[in-house]
Image: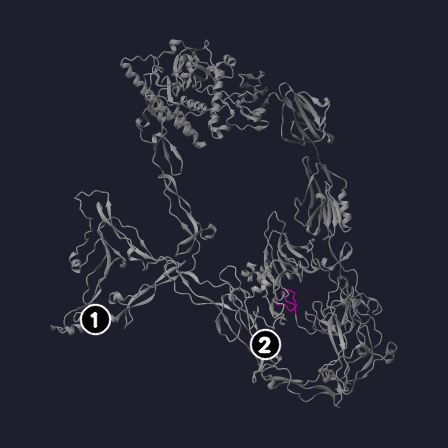
Amino acid sequence: MEGCRWTTAGTLLLASLVLSSRTARSEEDRDSLWDAWGSWSECSRTCGGGASYSLRRCLSSKTCEGRNIRYRTCSNVDCPPEAGDFRAQQCSAHNDVKYQGQFYEWLPVSNDLENPCSLKCQAKGTALVVELAPKVLDGTRCYTESLDMCISGLCQIVGCDHQLGSAVKEDNCGVCNGDGTTCRLVRGQYKSQLSANKLDDMVVAIPYGSRQIRLMLKGPDHLYLETKTLQGVKSENSLSSTGSFLVENSSISFQKLPDKEILRIPGPLTADFTIKIRYAGAADSSVQFIFYQPIVHRWRETDFFPCSASCGGGYQLTSAECFDLRSSRVVADQYCHYYPENIKPKPKLQECNLDPCPASDGYKQIMPYDLYHPLPRWESTPWTACSSSCGGGIQSRSVSCVEEDMQGHISPVEEWKCMYTPKMPVVQPCNIFDCPKWLAQEWSPCTVTCGQGLRYRVVLCIDHRGMHTGGCTPKTKPHIKEECIVPTPCYKPKEKLPVEAKLPWYKQAQELEEGAMVSEEPSFIPEAWSTCSVTCGVGSQVRLVKCQVLLSFSQSVADLPIDECEGPKPVSQRACYSGPCNGEATEYTPEESELLYGSLQEFDELYDWEYEGFTECSESCGGGVQEAVVTCLNKQTRETVDETLCVTSRRPPQLLKACSLDPCPPRWEIGKWSTCSLTCGVGLQTRDVFCSHLLSRETNETIVLADELCYTPKPSLVQACNRFDCPPSWYPTEWQECSVSCGEGTQSRNAICRKMLKTGHFVINSSLCPPLPFSSLTRPCALDTCTRHNRPVHKQSPHIMAIKKVYIQTRKQKKLHFVVGGYAYLLPKTSVNLRCPTRRFRKSMITWEKDDKRLISSAHITITPYGLIKINRLKPSDTGTYTCTAGPVQEHFVIKLIGSNKIIARQPASIREEETMRKPSLNEALRTEEKHVNRILFNGSKAEKRGHLVDPSRWYDYIVSRLIQYRGWPGENLASWEAQESTERNASSEEDQSREYSLPFTMITEQKRLDDIISNLSQQPEELKDVYTEQLVVQLAQEVFKSHLEHQESVIRASRKGLDTTSMEHPVHRHVSGFTSSLRTSSAEAFLPTSVDPVNGLRRPHRKPAILRKISAAQQLSASEVVTHLGQTVVLASGTLSVLLHCEAVGNPKPTISWAKNGEEVEYNERMLLQPDDSLQILEPVEADVGFYACNASNALGSDSVSIAVTLAGKPLIKASRATVINTESPAVTVDIGSTVKTIQRVNVTISCQVAGVPEAEVTWFKNKVKLSFAHHLHDGLLLIPNVSLSDQGLYSCKAANLRGEVTESSQLLVLEPPRPLPYLKDLTAVLSSAGTSAHSVLTSSSGTNMTISPGSSALIGCAVDGHPTPNITWLYSGKPLSLQHRLLAAGRILQILNVSDAPDGEFSCLAQNEAGLLTQKASLAIQEYQWSADKLMACSASCGHKGVQLPQLMCLLDGAEVNISYCKEKPKPALQPIACNRRDCPSRWMVTSWSPCTRSCGGGIQIRRVTCQRLTVKGNSVPMSNEACAQVSKRPVDTQNCNRQPCVEWVASSWGQCNGPCIGPRLAVQHRQVFCQTKDGISVSSDQCSSLPRPLSTQNCWTDLCGVHWRVSLWTVCTATCGNYGFQSRRVDCVHIRTNKPVMEHHCSWRPRPANWQRCNITPCENVECRDTTRYCEKVKQLKLCQLTQFKSRCCGTCGKA
């Protein structure tokens, strides 16, 4: 219990009389005879707002006016939280007092509207409400949400300033009597955006100190809170049920309804709150929120700065600083500028140190601040006129320093007195725009079509705005006519002068009559006069006058602007006389003529020019012009008439005005389309499109903006054009080299007929183009004259005269002769003579090589001393490249064999195999070659896919094979080749020419022609290559056969001349027939599948690849070249220049060969080459090339791989892998050293350490750097680790060492253990002990564990699993990832469900997984149900009579225990039936009626009532009983009592006092009188006794001359600054009498607001940004060293900058 108890009034009065001191009484107290007020009593409460009182006594024998007690509030500090509610303390004081025979625990009943100051309490657990005291202790709140307090049983109003009777309230920001500017209203709406990967989202962040927060969610989702205190402590609240609760000492009210949730927080918040939403349904939710957010950064006014002077009068200012309410510290000003509501307080200024200085006469010579004597200032005269009207001039003014005295007189003073502010400029530039300039337009075409003529142009005077105006200098005007010459000669005699244009129509007589005609010089041309306006008398005539020029080149006249014609303009109006109107001839005297023509002047004045509105604006935006419309008006009728009626010389000048000055919005600037990139097919056109903004139309200045700033769609930048098929046309290739190296020869080239379609594709078809003349494909060429060998002019290098051709043998021949430089595709058993013709080199010095190996004469191949080799009867081993070397130059010749199936054969692997190979084997080799070429051309090897050819000869093979398989030759016997090969013939039969063939024995074509075909094929899409190949082969066949015919005819012609043809290298046949027609109908032969024999159609068996192992050692060809087969070791020496690694594989389908180095694919480059036979060649090997090279052969059935080791200088080399092998099933694992092995237990692990080196290296094994015993070793560098367990884990190393060095590689062995269940979980026990007994826990199991739990509670689910490595645990609910509110503990092994009600049904499972496997454990939670119970009965409502009932007591139970009734709100309530109780006759008791009215209203009366004894029966009847029956139970109540004993009183007033009170208006004051309460006998009593009667007035208004006063003000002083934010001025303000005009005390004028005596002035931004002073006190600021302060530094920039 706090505070002190109130005692009786008498005791308090006695204490007050003893303790009060007799202080001096006020005038009011003496008048009313009251003693002084006593001291204040002790506060009724120690905290939370209590009451204190003070007493006084009446010193008069009569009743004093007023009250003898007064109250005030006290202890207005918040109580600590543990203090509890003051009303609850008063209720609990009755807990130890029996009520109706038993003890109760009493709880307060608050907010009683009828009697809020009575102490009503409710017995806990019952519906019993009792008034335990008629009034609560003073200081108790009337209502819980109000500051109003109870005093003496009455509710007294208390404002937020804690003053009694105050109506001041808090604003929305919580500021007492505030204006709502310290906070801002925040309202908004949030809409959920449901996504699969987001379970919740933030709605709004509400900062510390916010108030009146209200949020309403509509939808299926749920709200929850996150808080963060100023100390950084974070917490979360789920808001799971309806209710009121505390979060971070902030009271929260939450309502959870079926379709919405409402959250209210009165505030202020004591932490930062974040409102979040947890998604719970598929539908979207919306949240509306509103709250008042405090402005945490506010301006705070500082104290006054030190005085500017220590004596004699100075000034001092205040400033404002930005204050952070959260951190209670001063921050930078920009924090306060962030809020628009924050208005920085203006500095206050006051005078200080006004005492006179002792060392002087008491006055200052120059005061820094003087209210009545302004400082000197600068004054200026107006600017003079500009020195130039355009092009930039200057203007000046005078500036002087002046001073103003007290009477306002201004006089000049020395300039130094004004130097406290910068002197104003005396000169400035003006009219800086450009002067008008002549602008010449483009020249017209020449006036003649041949020879010499003239041309013209228009020249205008343009001003700086681009307007056509005057003001240009006539002397500088460019000429408007000049001579011109047309290069076309005229077929007539030349004229000496330029040709002048002739008149285009026949009006010459009229023009001559007027004295003007159209010429090539601009001139005024008047038209004919109109008829006279009258038929008799004097009228008028008008005509048009134009400025025209003759353009003789077009025989036309052009109209020019009037100002382009020089000289006076002819008149356009004149008077006319049509004879006398009466038909009589009249002659006029000179006077009459003057009178007649004088009327024409009056005629002129009848019409005049006037402006009538403006034309439309020339531009819609960005600034345009409008021109005033000038019309000719009839002055009398005001109607528009023809302009010819007005005098031209009086026409008003052109009048322009600006319009549409708003800036143009950004728009797209579009350039012109470029020319089409192609004339047919499909071309492209491009254009520039950019977003631009016109800044000024005067300067035509534009800026380019980002595309996003133009709102309309961007126009396209590209468009197609010329979309139609091109006509077919020949496209020639580049010219080949000259056919000779000296002298005269020929050059040739090829041509392709190509047609481009409008789709962009090409069609190549020679039949589409017209025949191409042969002369366009050949041309003569001439080189230097050939020199004779016996007379060398100068020494030249040797030269081999090679012929770059391709020869294809089609029929059996005995012998063929060739020259080096080409390719020959020959039939087996043909003899060959190969020449190497040279110049400037001895033929006996020529050397020959085959496939880079030196050739030596033998019985089969003969090398003659004249540069010739002879090959006797070709066999497969003769295929290859033959190289002729003549000193520094070389030339090659390639020989290839044609098999029986017309497929090109390749050289066999070895001569020994070739000799034993039979004919079927040869054909099989040929077919294999065809497959390989086909694969290269259509599938492409890796090298081809990188964009270059590995071996171009394979392309030749493919094209030649297609050519010889071509079936369109005339009269061809398709089986002739096979028949010839199957039957051996002697020499005579081979040379037998009696059979007639249509083909030549040998087809010849240029090697360049095949290159062009290959280039064309490489550019075609993959799907069209076969089609184009067929077309190109047909064209090639035509060309070959055509050249054969031409060659045959030349031979026949030569033979007729008697020439010897026996030495021809290529014999020809005579008969050719029907070839042209057969070519047109032919088609390319399709290739057969690789596994089908093309001869007999038999399918060969399929076979997995197998690589042929060679046991021979590496072949050291020379010191620089090494050739080896697989399975060997190559040692690189310092002189090794080349290493060739062979790899041969067999299989069907044919295996694909690829190479890898140390497990990674070999990247081919200029050093690392893949040869045509799939061998790998390393040129100029380096140390980086050391390693194990694996040849991999694969086809659809499998693969094979063999390695070759390449070492440096014999140093050991280990074949290592960097792979990671994970084994969870296999009983055995084998890996290369260097790998990482992860395997389960009880597995046999073998680690291979393949070593190469010369000499052979010794292998040593280590485990964790400890040498292993030989018991672990196996042969060939294998290490076996049987039956692996956890103890075998570690790092296994293999070290290889020989005399050249040593090397070590290591493998890591990790043993895996799949996840397995454990019987218990230690972490769960620890978590349970820290969480307390309220948490429920369960362990998962493979079959699933069940647990029953109360709703809304928390649960812990443990996942007890083990494994190696430690398994990763993933929690699922109903097979899906968790979406409900949860926490993961103990590294994920424990799942805490914060509210099990979020998981009504479903199964929790933990998925434990590591590299060895996975394990799933499950658990299910069953939620107990809340239910209603009505087993207990409430107390009976009556102890006797006929109305007693008992109602069942409704309780909410969970598992038999009572819980809060709100948990059962969702459950339907059971029907409650009342039970009768205590139905018996009541004992006798007294019954009383109400009191009657009092007999008197005052002075004492009586009132009565009736008292009877009655008994209530069980049936509800009341039966009268004798008084004795009731007297035994209780004492009889009284039936009579006194009333209205107070004396009869009335209000009495004294006479009015003098009219000398405070003035309340002009000549208006207040007068008083006393009003007191007394009895009818004249005895004064307390005013309270008259309170029910209307009280007379005690004050009234009265008239007096003393209040005839008003405020008088003087003029303002000059402003202290000319610009900026700190200028001020002052004036004198006095209260004076209206009649005497003398000053009186200011309180007499207080009824009217006092005018301000100082104000801000010149609050405008300073125009120039240079550093200067804006106040006149800057010298004082400098003296007082205040320049460092921001507010002085900016205002005194000039002075402080000098300091």
Give me the disc on residue 600: 1
Q: Nearer the viewer, residue 1678 or 1341?
A: 1678
Residue at image mark 2: 1649
> On the image, which quarter does residue 1036 sit in?
top left
Q: Nearer the viewer, residue 1321 or 1155?
A: 1155
- Magenta span includes 171: yes
The main secondary structure of the magenta stretch is loop
Dot 1 crowding, Cα within 10 Å, few <14, some 14–19, many 20+? some
1232 left or right of 1033 in image? right
- Magenta span includes 964: no
**Kind of residue at badge 1:** Leu
**Kind of residue at badge 2:** Pro
Q: What stretch is highlighted in magenta?
A: 169-179
Q: Where is residue 280 in the image (x, y as percent from the top left)?
A: 64, 52
Considering the image in quadrants, where does the N terminus appear?
bottom right
Considering the image in quadrants, where does the C terminus appear?
bottom right
1032 left or right of 1107 in image? left
Name of the residue lying farthest toward the left? 585
Q: Is residue 1315 visible?
A: no
Q: How far apart are marks 1 and 2 (CA)?
A: 78 Å
